[in-house]
Amino acid sequence: MTGPNQPVLNVEDLAVTFPERGGTGRRVVDGVSFQVAAGECVAIVGESGSGKSVTARSIVGLAGEGARVTAAELTVAGQDVLSLSGRRLRALRGGTVGLIAQDALVSLDPLRPVGREIGDTLALHTGLDAAARRARTIELLERVGLPDAELRARQRPGQLSGGQRQRALIAAGIAGEPRLVIADEPTTALDQPVQAGVLRLLGQLRDDGTGVLLISHDLSVVLGIADRVLVMTDGAVVEEGTPAEVFERPRHPYTRKLVSAVPAGVPRGAPLSAAAGPAGGVERTSGRGIAADRPTKPTFGGAGARGATRPTFGDTLLEARGLARTFQVGGREIVAADDVSFTLRAGRTLGLVGESGSGKSTTARLLLGLERPDAGEVTLLGEPWIPLPEARRRARRPLVGAVFQDALSSFDPRWTVGTVLADALTRGRTTRPGPVRNEIAELLDTVGLDPAVATRRPLHLSGGQRQRVAVARALAADPRVLILDEPVSALDVSVQAQVLDLLDRLQRERNLAYLLITHDLGVALHMSDDVAVMQEGHIVGSGPAATVFDDPQHPYVRLLREAAPIAVRGTGRD
Amino acid sequence: MSAFRPTVAEALAGLVLLLLLVAALWPNLLAPGDPLAVARSEAFQPPSLAHLFGTDESGRDIYTRVIHGAAESLRIGVLATAIGIGLATVLGFAAGLGPRWLDFGTTRLVEVLFAFPGLLLGLLFIVVTGPGVLSSTIAVGLAAAPGYARIIRSQVRRTASAEFVEAARVLGRGRLWIVVRHILPNVTAALFVLATLGLGQAVIWVSSLSYLGLGAVPPAAEWGAMLAAGRTYIANFWWMTFFPGLAIVAGAAAATVIGRGIQKRNRSAG
Amino acid sequence: MPGNRRWLLLRAGGVVFVLWAAATITFFALRLVPGDPAEAILGGPGSQAGPEALEQVRREYGLDQPLVVQYLTYLGRLVTGDLGQSYSLHKPVATAIGEQFGATLSLALCSLVLAWVLACALAAWSVRGGRVAWAIGSGLELVAAAVPHFWLATVLILFFSLTLGILPPVSVPGPLGIVLPALTMAIPLAGFLGQVMRESLLTAMESPFVTTARARGESEVRIFWRHTLRHAAIPAVGLSGWAFGSLISGAVVVESVFARQGLGRSLLSAVQLRDVTLVTGIVLVVALAYTVMTLVTDLADRAIDPRGRAVTE
């Protein structure tokens, strides 16, 4: 038996190397040491590629094929993981250590009922017979807060909601009554209210005496639950402390950058990435950094705005009235939008927030004329825009630009960045970058990219670079309104901060009207002048960003606010 | 770029295809002899240095015949594939881009054609036109078309609903522009793969028809016809059937490896 | 479940439609044969049929009637199971098919089962054997899929009958006679199924749920049988309808090589003799069998992968 002071997990000088063709190998984890005690929650925070997931997986011997793992000490409940035989290692996995991966839709076998997955763990690590396993499965599902456990046990992951799935995955992870639970990004794919529930559940586990190792890219997620936080970057731990220490008095420059990149609580207009030095260092390979106060550039050479004059701040640019759209799915009606009305003004941002499936994206598609509304209308610069035959809308399409969540799939895989921009700049007259080489370079410079990027394919760019190219494409036609559909939700925090700063700067330079669709309250509050909250196709609350959450008129708005990670409520609170 | 470095199997397959191509275009480079030269005294020689693959019942050199047969076999295979893909492209694009009723009609038609599995459609065709090289070629193309059409349709639909096509619409591009600039180029890449993979199968089926006496007939140096001729002597002179068959297997396998190689790279390139 | 019944009804309606369309196509294909249709029915211009025989055929098939009437009569006969008279066999086509159908069906089913066993065994072996076994496995599948039936039959006869002398070179009645023909058809099919399975096996093995299974302490063998094999089998099961079709085509070749009786061999000789009635009869019966087979495949697919069902319900 281990006493309260003896750690469940002891990691001393852990290093993981992956073999590389013609080299000594790529070291992704280097000299990492930490302990997790029983009843303690330790969080490792880092961005993609920081080595946090590999660290977590090394603990159960699943670092990956070909990985070379060394450590001065790597013990779980007194057992030396590195010297365990295959059979003993399998007894450790699921028995002593439970692993909870992210996105239960793919982490649970989609073809099998979730109850079977839990039953398998029980069969491997307990001596229970079939009937007892069934009873225990129901018990576990009830313990993780799944109503109708009997029914849920018979359902497959695809039939459960995101939150239910994640709870089932946790039930499978704790079925062997492990001393240590490793939760690898357990809330990433979830909406914020659901996220809060899952985190509470992990907190309960910790309070019951289990050691919890929580891995996350999101600093704000771990604040409420972790006892200690480790910040990782480039395979090494650069900072360690209590959440309050790390968040309020970060010592390491990287931590400072990470903390300031969190948009929650940062006032509108204040840069997120500038605090940690020139942001260009990350995205740019050469040339000038992004200066927040660069002079306004009215239009691009020959391809700029035609006819329409530049609006002044606060002008009404786009007005949606009573938009409605219903979908027929398998005989059922799904209301994606009903009586949706709002106004977009020059130089201002309307943030549209809500859970997944609340109709945010349908609203964006209606505005962009990609979906026909059942009812309602949209006017653009005072003239009709929707509904209108596509042919009559086409000439004015350049006025409304769009940036999508998945930048990569919004580019033709056969096109280079130069092709994409040449097409956008010349309005489809040519896809050869040659004739508009200078305009392309200028455009890339505006979004903080090196002109050399023009020759590359989006596939070979980083996520942040891709999203910048997407912004450049939207700008090329010199729009008045930008529809931003989850433009940063696929990005790491520090990259997200840079893209948000870029969008903010462009808005001020060009008096653009933004519709910002996001599931992230922090992003919405930082970027928006006004906020509208959507639920089941309806706007259930709207108003100035500063007041809509302080004065909730709808229970859902309150729920969303309560569920949001602590940081949204302001860092000065405690 | 390392992404285009061929694997061992691909390099080997490329070599085989190159050899076949040379054999088809300039057979005398690889086998200077006459494929139809009869030498009764040298009949039924087993493989040796003088006759790499042995000789047949009339003393004709089988190696020379296999090399000279490449042109005929490949030509028929390519033609059959072209017929199949051509027909399928029309059907697939009509269904993928046309209005709903056209899609509905074409899809039903393809479904009905599917009910004549494999060679049945081809045999039905041969019974109408009578046997021969040309009708067996068309028959194989016809038999393959429904399968291709289904793949092309789904490829067209997938590309047409891709996010980059929506992005082009948001930028104000017209329908025709999108078809020409986005959908055609992206589907063509898939068509190329389909054709390479189909070529191997077409060669197999065309030679099968020849073997059954419904296509090319002996003494033509077509591989299937050669096998059919060797059939009678199989008990004693195995090399007469073994080597022409090996040529078919090597050609078909090489085409498959290359086709799948391109497919894999297309996929990883987006 | 109401969703299931609706689905079945819809599918059954589809089957009837496809059969009707297939019958229509064969009817008009028959009219496309150049020259006098009566002559075509008796084997084409080369048959030198006498004027009385032609006259009798014309009367029997109602060729003197308008096309619409002919077509409707034809459909009416099909519904009652009358497929016409074979001139080359001198008996009703339906009877001839009835005699041959069983032999081909048992051959096709044996081959299908054998192909599945071969493909799964190879996949299971190469999953456990590391990189070398994987390469060998995919190489074997590649070659197997590229082998023409008639050549493989020759090689197998050469090896098993003429060299080892353990199996008969031509088909004899009894279970021993079916071994070589079934093997001949199963090997290329196993190659195809294996290639498809291998691709999806690779995807399945990299899926996060496999990591979850490992993290709960499952062994690699159990992961293969419980998780990945099932995922890998889905696309291959979907191909089984197509596989059945290719087996029928294969039967045309294989039954001839092994001098085995069956639909395939009858079809070949009917094509060679241009016995149009017999060809269309066989083609229609195969179309029926194939369509039913596809329906069965879809049912199996729904049993293995219940996800599709959730969408249609």
Image (cartoon, coloured by chain):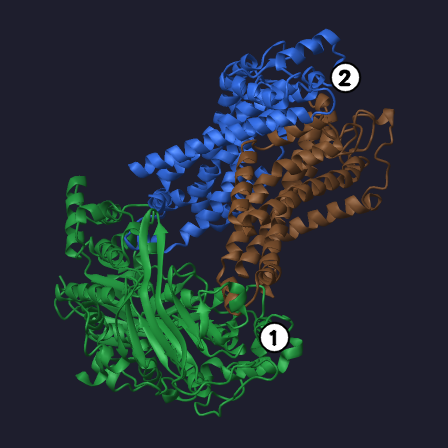
Q: Mark 2 belongs to which amino acid?
A: Gly
Q: Secondary structure at mark 2?
A: helix
Q: Residue placed at 44% from the left, 92% from the top?
A: A293
* Quarter placement of the C terminus of chain A: bottom left
- Residue C213 position within the rendered picture, expressed as x and y whole percent measured from the top left: 31, 51
Residue C11: x %, y % from top left:
42, 34
- Alpha-carbon neighbours of circle 2 within 10 Å: few (<14), some, or many (≥20)? few
Q: Determine which quarter of the picture holds residue A127.
A: top left
Chain of residue at mark 2: C
Q: In the picture, one chain is green; tell me its letter.
A: A
Q: Position of residue A315 (x, y in %)?
A: 40, 84
In the image, residue A522 sits, relative to residue A157, either above or below, namely: below
- Answer whether labels 1 and 2 touch (C-beta < 8 Å): no
Q: Which chain is brown?
A: B
> Label 1 is placed on what type of residue?
Thr
Which chain contains the residue that carries disc 1? A
Residue at numbered disc 2 = C46
Establish if A366 lies above or below C237: below
Gap between marks 1 and 2 measured at Cα: 68 Å
The quarter of the rendered structure image containing the N terminus of chain A is bottom left
**What letter labels the chain drawn in blue?**
C
The answer to whether C16 appears left or right of A77 in the picture is right
